[in-house]
Amino acid sequence: KQEVTQIPAALSVPEGENLVLNCSFTDSAIYNLQWFRQDPGKGLTSLLLIQSSQREQTSGRLNASLDKSSGRSTLYIAASQPGDSATYLCAVNAGNQFYFGTGTSLTVIP
Amino acid sequence: NAGVMQNPRHLVRRRGQEARLRCSPMKGHSHVYWYRQLPEEGLKFMVYLQKENIIDESGMPKERFSAEFPKEGPSILRIQQVVRGDSAAYFCASSPTGLAGGPEQFFGPGTRLTVL
């Protein structure tokens, strides 16, 4: 069974810092991996989607990488802003369902 | 193109009542997924449906829970005889193709169920 782990569980950084969020998964047989953002009491907003054949995807200040063989993905956020404060979730598509990590709660301090 | 719609956004039920949660996928999407997020926990898959078919219900509790996605109308997640432990946020997602095609999933805003 696929298990997804996100480290750290919480992260607090001053505004302007670059940061990396980590996601690891136990079964490398995946179709894709998707990073989401969730604000308190809200739904999920899709940030980046990486297909299993891809190594990375970029959108604005966000860059996500995927190393399927080692079961790892990272989300890099450049020049963090207070508006980036949220919980970040990674989800692995195993073909029949998405498996979610428990998320990293990010606080960017002005 | 409207996103995934869920209603109601908030639902309060007393123990023993029924809860019906509705999900309208994005236009052109025929694959729907339901997830549950318990307080302080991650999202857990419940069921994957395509029009008129249940594809995978391995995450659904064996009793009291059912889901459907009829030919016309929204997908419905039904919880009979609710208990306090059913209190959670229920999210629906949709995609244009099945997961084996590697599609992006789009999520609705969720329904927050509170059982008194």
Image (cartoon, coloured by chain):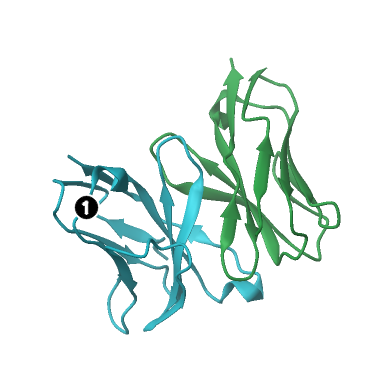
Chain colours: A green, B cyan
Q: Chain of mark 1?
A: B
The quarter holding residue A74 reads top right
> Looking at the picture, how far across and down is residue A58, in whole percent?
74, 49
Q: Position of residue A104 (x, y in %)?
A: 61, 34
As rendered, which of B113 and A75 lies closer to the eye?
Answer: B113
Residue carrying label 1? B82
Q: Using residue A105 as the reference point, say whether residue B17 is left or right of it.
A: left
Residue B28 visible, this orientation:
no
Closest to the observer, B79 or B99:
B79
Q: Residue at x 81, y 66 (%)?
A: A53
Q: In the rendered view of the protein, which quadrant contains the N terminus of chain B?
A: bottom left
Q: Is any atom of residue B81 visible in this view?
A: yes
| Residue drawn 59% across the image and 56% down it | A99
In the image, residue B64 sits, relative to residue A23, either above or below, namely below
Q: Position of residue A65 (x, y in %)?
A: 79, 49
- Residue positioned 40% across, 43% down in the render: B38
The local secondary structure at tag 1 comes to loop
* Circle 1: residue type: Val
A7 over B42 or under it: above or below: above
Work out whether A76 lies above or below A47. above
Quarter where residue A69 is shown: bottom right
Density class for disc 1 (Cα within 10 Å; few <14, some 14-19, many ≥20) is many
Judge from the rendering whether residue A66 lies leftward or rightward of residue A102; answer left or right: right
Q: How many numbered markers are drawn?
A: 1
